[in-house]
Image (spheres, rainbow, N blue to C red):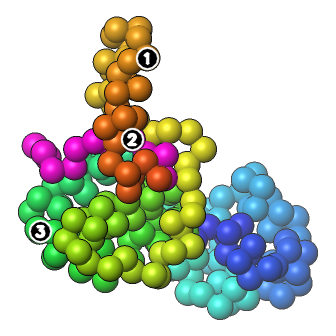
Amino acid sequence: MQLNARMARQNLSIYRLSKTSGVPYATLNDICNGKAKLEKCSAETVYRLARALDVSMEELLAPYLTKRSSFELFKSSVCHRLKEMGDLDFIMDALKSREIRTYYDRGWYPESLYLLAMLDYVSSLNGVPLCSEYDDLRICRLDKPLYPASVLAIRAASKDESALIQAERDAIPEFKRFNIIECDVRNAV
């Protein structure tokens, strides 16, 4: 979880965290406002912040050091994982790994909601009750529809909105609920 999100979750202002951690207000303000990078700060600064937030240094730095792949690559990876593992093993793995929450806490909302949609979709197909652990995320929705790259390419080539309209009509409800337009998750190549 990024520093600003962690502070919000713990109801801490920059001023309060500065006083608690001993990190100068100006330094913390620069980190929170993107003028300075947490991963470039001294070990002492990271240590003080981690200690004040009651997390490890690794946990505090992880969101800043993890590289994010393209969303299309992520989707493909999830679909391949479903195909290779099978439905029930996929469900168990998704729940055990806690990736959905990890992505959400990093601010990677499309990835988090896509994986949750996949979990809900596969659970529904197999008569598995939905895990209530993610009920707070099930009320989330992306601001704009997220279409597959192939649909966007067809629209660009044809200069016609009909591809988008058809994709929305064919979208799997568990994905559409999050404003993710996904029609086929079983044909991973």
- Find residue 83 and report its image quarter: bottom left
Q: Which residue is tagged 1?
A: 161
- Find residue 71 and report its image quarter: top left
Residue 165 position (above or below residue 82): above
Residue 125 seen in this snapshot: yes
- Dot in front, 1 or 3: 1
Confirm whether the magenta stretch covers residue 83. no
Question: Amino acid type of disc 2?
Answer: Ile
Which mark sits nearer the N-terminus, 2 or 1? Answer: 1
Q: Residue at x 68, y 69 (%)?
A: 5
Residue 48 seen in this snapshot: no
Mark 1 to mark 3 CA distance (whole Å)? 36 Å
Q: Which residue is tagged 2?
A: 181
Q: Which residue is tagged 3?
A: 85
Q: Residue at x 74, y 62 (%)?
A: 31
Asked if marks 1 and 3 touch (Cβ < 8 Å), the reply is no
> What's the magenta region?
178-189
Q: Nearer the viewer, residue 3 or 156?
A: 156
Helix, strand or loop for disc 1: loop
Question: Amino acid type of disc 3?
Answer: Met
Asked if marks 2 and 1 touch (Cβ < 8 Å), the reply is no
- Residue 140 location, x and y as percent? 57, 60
- Dot in front, 3 or 2: 2
Question: Amino acid type of disc 1?
Answer: Glu
Which of the labelled discs sits on residue 41, or is there none? none
Looking at the rendered image, the quarter that the N terminus falls into is bottom right
Q: Residue at x 23, y 75 (%)?
A: 127
Mark 3 to mark 2 CA distance (whole Å)? 24 Å
